[in-house]
Each structure stands twice: as C-alpha cells, then as structure tokens.
Image (cartoon, helix red, strand yellow):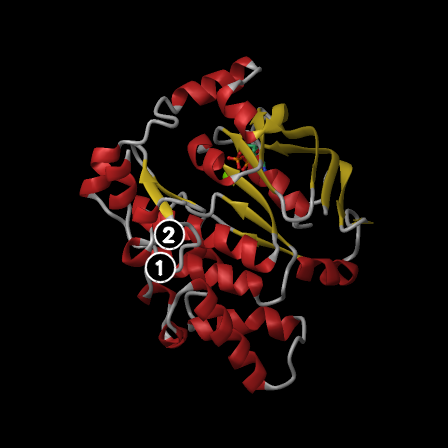
Amino acid sequence: MLKAEHLSKHYCSGVIRKHHVDAVSGVSFEIGKGEILGIAGNSGCGKSTIARMLMGLEDPDEGAVWLDGQKISGLTMGQMREHRKKMQMIFQHPESSLDPQKKILFSMTEPMKIHRVYREQKKMQQRIEELFDLVGVSTGLLSRYPHQISGGEAQRIMIARALTLDPKVLILDEPTSMLDVSIQAHVMCLLKDLRNKLDLTYLFISHDLEVLGWFCDRISIMSRGKFVESGDTEQIIHNPGHPFTKELVDSFSNFGQEEKDECKQNPVFPDGCGGEKLYRSSQKVFCEPGSSDPADSGDRERTGCTAVCSEK
Ligand SMILES: Nc1ncnc2c1ncn2[C@@H]1O[C@H](COP(=O)(O)OP(=O)(O)O)[C@@H](O)[C@H]1O
Ligand SMILES: [Mg+2]
C-alpha cells in the first residue's frame, strides 16, 4: 500500500557557520494494506522528516515514495492532489492544524471544499455529522473556536477532518504525545477502532515504545536518520537485536508489568472503545480487544478495567 525506497533528506542551516544535518539517510520500508507500522526513535532522529516526505510536504534528496503502486515523489502539486486524498496526516499539535480565527466548522469543510467532494452544503453537513459521531464528539463543537475546545476534542476533530476525504492511509506523527494519560488512551482506542471499521493502513510515529508495542504489527527502530532494526512487534520488544533497540526497550522497564492495583484505583471509561479489556501500566492506559472473560461482559464491558484487574 505504502512504500518508501532509500529515502534521504539532508538539511543545511546556520547563519554564521553552515551546519549540515543528515535528517534521514537511506530509509526503506513497506506497509501492507490494513497493517500498522510503527517508527520509534528519540527526538530529532528524523521521524517527522520521513512523515513530511511521505506526504509530499518535502521532496526527498534521494529515494522515492510509492502509494498504491504509483510513484508519488516528484509529482506536481496538481498531480499530488489526487494522492493527498488517499493519504492524510495527523500531527502532534492538533491546535496548530486548526485556524485560530475560524470556527471548527470551517476547518472541517475546508478539505471537502478544496477537493470539491460535495456540491451540496447539506451533504457536506451530513458527512461531518457522521464523522463526528464516529470519533465521538458532539456537533455542538462546530460553532466553537479552537481555543474553546479541549486537547482531546481537538485531536478527535483532527482525526474526523483527516477522514473527510476517505483516505486509505493515515500517517500518525506522535498523535497523542501532547495529551494527558487517560485522554491518550481514549484516542489510541479510537484509532484502533477506526482502523478496523474503515480498513485503514497506519504509519504510527512515536518516541514511546510502550505505546507502539501495544498498537503496531511491526516496528522499525530509528536512530540518527537510519533504521537500525525492523521486525514484528513481539520480536522487537521481547527479543531486540540491536544495542540501540535494547537500550530503548530497557528505558521502558515496566513493559508488560501492568500495575493492576493502580488500575483498580483509576478505572477508565473509554467511549466507543473497540476493546473489551483495559489495563494500566506504570504510566499509560491501554485497552485490549477480544477478552473472552465473562466478567468483562454486560455492563462492565468496555466500561472499566476493574474486572480485568480483579481477574489477575
Ligand atoms: N527545516 C529544517 N531545517 C534544518 N534542519 C531541520 C529541519 N527540519 C528538521 N531538521 C533537523 O533534522 C533532524 C530530524 O528532525 P525531525 O525529523 O523533526 O526529528 P523527530 O521527528 O524524530 O524529532 C533534527 O536534527 C532537526 O533539527
Ligand atoms: Mg517529530
């Protein structure tokens, strides 16, 4: 579905002395339809630069991007327009993607107007209502300005906005790192749910290996512009090969050791979460799909983690 071949990007900056940065050097990967690939790495290692090259926001110095069998690097703005519909990006700071001077309704209709998706205002309105329902926010927010909504609401709205054009691929660049822990869990659950419902393909970028470990099918570990190791999530987390991966895994020392007691004290109620189990590790809250435990059914299903906690 999405392929990157030997992507490289070098920057040259500085006023007094020129400073060269090899932001991305020879990165290649492929993501199959419906798959979630995670890219993990420390701040400044080149993750967002990859995202920008994939989206055509920056041209690679070397290499190319392929979407749905078509090479999209080097296309003109006009040619890129069609591909933009297929691939959308969610940024770390939702507020930076919303015009502070305009009501939310404006930001929601903008992509549909640019791409001339609907001729009738009513159809556009209907589509927005459907999407707001899907991401779990009230349409009452449409008449508010960005400063009048919470961070979690803003990120849900950005997800809805990204979905207005029916994309096949979402590039998620640290989509929850600015949100607080419980909101983060809700948004992660929502993203997982949407992937299943809408058959989406994700590239998920994060510095947080714990979140990636829960969310992704495969993970690539990035350091100083290069992929140092790639593999199935299980292998990366439980059997890391590269010293840098080991270091990164060790920095999340609480892997898999969910603190059940803490979980009991802090039940979380994710709206519309596709999962049935919820657990809390040292710092984060995750849900897990497909629990067969009868204690999780009925009212408790999707409404809290107490059953799971008491079970273990
Ligand atoms: N427009 C730019 N000009 C100069 N250097 C840049 C530019 N964008 C990013 N960089 C540098 O490239 C490196 C990778 O940045 P980035 O991709 O944003 O990292 P990450 O997303 O992993 O934190 C960093 O050293 C950053 O300072
Ligand atoms: Mg970044």
Q: Amino acid at mark 2?
A: His
Reading the image, the residue beneath label 2 is 186
> Nearer the N terminus, badge 1 or badge 2?
2
Q: What is the secondary structure assignment of the residue under circle 2?
A: helix
Q: Nearer the viewer, residue 151 or 186?
A: 186
Instruction: Left or right? Give the position of 172 relative to 116.
Output: left
Label 1 to label 2, Cα distance in Å?
Answer: 7 Å
Residue at left offset 54%, top offset 18%: 240
Mark 2, Cα crowd under 10 Å, few <14 / some 14-19 / many 20+, is many
**Residue 310, quarter of the rendered image:** top left
Query: Where residue 18 appears, x then y in whole percent?
Result: 61, 27
Reading the image, the residue beneath label 1 is 271
Instruction: Left or right? Give the position of 153 relative to 58.
Output: left
Query: Where residue 115 appears, x then y in whole percent?
Result: 67, 71
Vertical relation: 215 (above or below) 55: above
Residue at left offset 40%, top offset 65%: 136
Query: Where residue 92 appears, x then y in whole percent?
Result: 46, 47
Instruction: Left or right? Give the position of 62 relative to 245.
Output: right
Q: Amino acid at mark 1?
A: Asp
Mark 1, Cα crowd under 10 Å, few <14 / some 14-19 / many 20+, is some
**Residue 298, quarter of the rendered image:** bottom left
**Residues marked 1 and 2 touching at CB (< 8 Å):** yes
